[in-house]
Image (cartoon, rainbow, N blue to C red):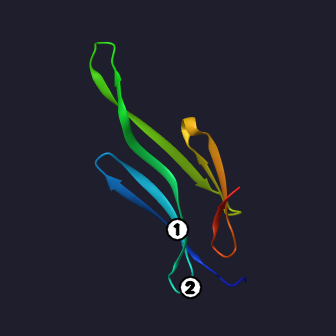
Amino acid sequence: MREKLFDGILFEYVESEGSQKYLCTFDKAGKLISKMTIALYHRSGTYANDDGGRSPFWASSEGCIGEDLSVHVDAGGNGKQSYQIHQDGKITRE
């Protein structure tokens, strides 16, 4: 069995205008190695309804962590981004 070099956690920060999900890696001493936003959902404006009223527009992105520790984030209109979690816990954009 390989020695565990880092721990990873996912956590969500929720507020009235939306939420963000983060992926963080920590070394054995508990020191932060890397942090990234893996998903979000937030109010980003309004749009006009057919009846002339306004409704909120919500933007979102979603991510997936693969068994090979690859991370893929679909940011909607901003495209797809790929990351890799390395054996030392560092997260880098591919």
Which residue is outermost to the top? 51
Please name the residue shown 71% across and 63% down the image: 68
* Image location of residue 91, percent across then percent down: 63, 65
Please name the residue shown 50% across and 51% down the image: 39
Q: Looking at the rendering, in which quadrant would you find the C terminus?
A: bottom right
Of residues 17 and 1, the one drawn nearer to the viewer in this rendering: 17
Q: Amino acid at mark 2?
A: Lys
* Image location of residue 36, percent across then percent down: 53, 60
Tag 2 residue: 28
Circle 1 packing at 10 Å, graded few (<14), some (14-19), many (20+), is many
Q: Amino acid at mark 1?
A: Cys
Q: Looking at the rendering, in which quadrant would you find the N terminus?
A: bottom right
Tag 1 residue: 24
Of residues 60 and 32, the one drawn nearer to the viewer in this rendering: 32
> Quick check: 29 above or below 79?
below
* Image location of residue 13, percent across then percent down: 38, 58
